[in-house]
Amino acid sequence: MTDTVTAPAPATAGTSLYATAATRKPTQAFDSEMFLKLLVTQLQNQDPSSPMDSTQMISQTSQLASMQQLTNLNSATTDSYNLQMRSAAANVLGKTVSWTDADGAAHTGLATSVSFSGSTPSVTVGGDTVALTDLTGITTTTSSS
């Protein structure tokens, strides 16, 4: 008498031999929440006969605090830069501006409006829209009385 081993039947469409785990989207950024999850997991799975060194834990905690402060500083700096760009664009209104187009031709005209819709404010001069960073000169128009 021989023993026969049979393989499981192949899975059909829509079924699986194994339970499927929930699909997880990978995290692209290392943030404070991820750091804390890693630290807690590390503490839960440490060897009781050789626990984590308290100096190492303090070091990791201070690294987390530093990372949070750098993130806050970066955000504040970005907000400040954006505000300065908007202020500079608003100050151009009513002034004569100069710029060079993509073909290298110099243009001059009166700035009549400003748009903040893109990442860089743009100025409307006549029928042209010019990015604030593309302006090469600004002249205050003087009126003679």
Image (cartoon, rainbow, N blue to C red):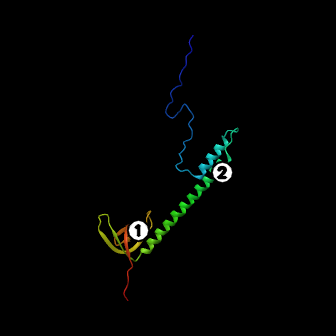
Q: Position of residue 58 (x, y in %)?
A: 66, 51
87 or 127, nearer to the observer: 87
The residue labelled by disc 2 is: 58
Front position among marks 2 and 1:
2
139 or 59, nearer to the observer: 59
| Residue at 66% over, 48% down | 55
Q: Residue furthest bottom?
A: 145
Count how many numbered circles sit on residues in the image. Answer: 2
Per the image, label 2 sits on a secondary structure element best described as helix
| Residue at 63% over, 51% down | 59
User: Which quadrant holds the N terminus?
Assistant: top right
Per the image, label 1 sits on a secondary structure element best described as helix
Mark 2 closeness class: few <14, some 14–19, many ≥20 residues within 10 Å:
few
| Residue at 37% over, 68% down | 129
Vertical placement of 36 versus 73: above or below?
above
49 or 70, nearer to the observer: 49
Q: Position of residue 133 (x, y in %)?
A: 40, 66
Q: Residue furthest right?
A: 49
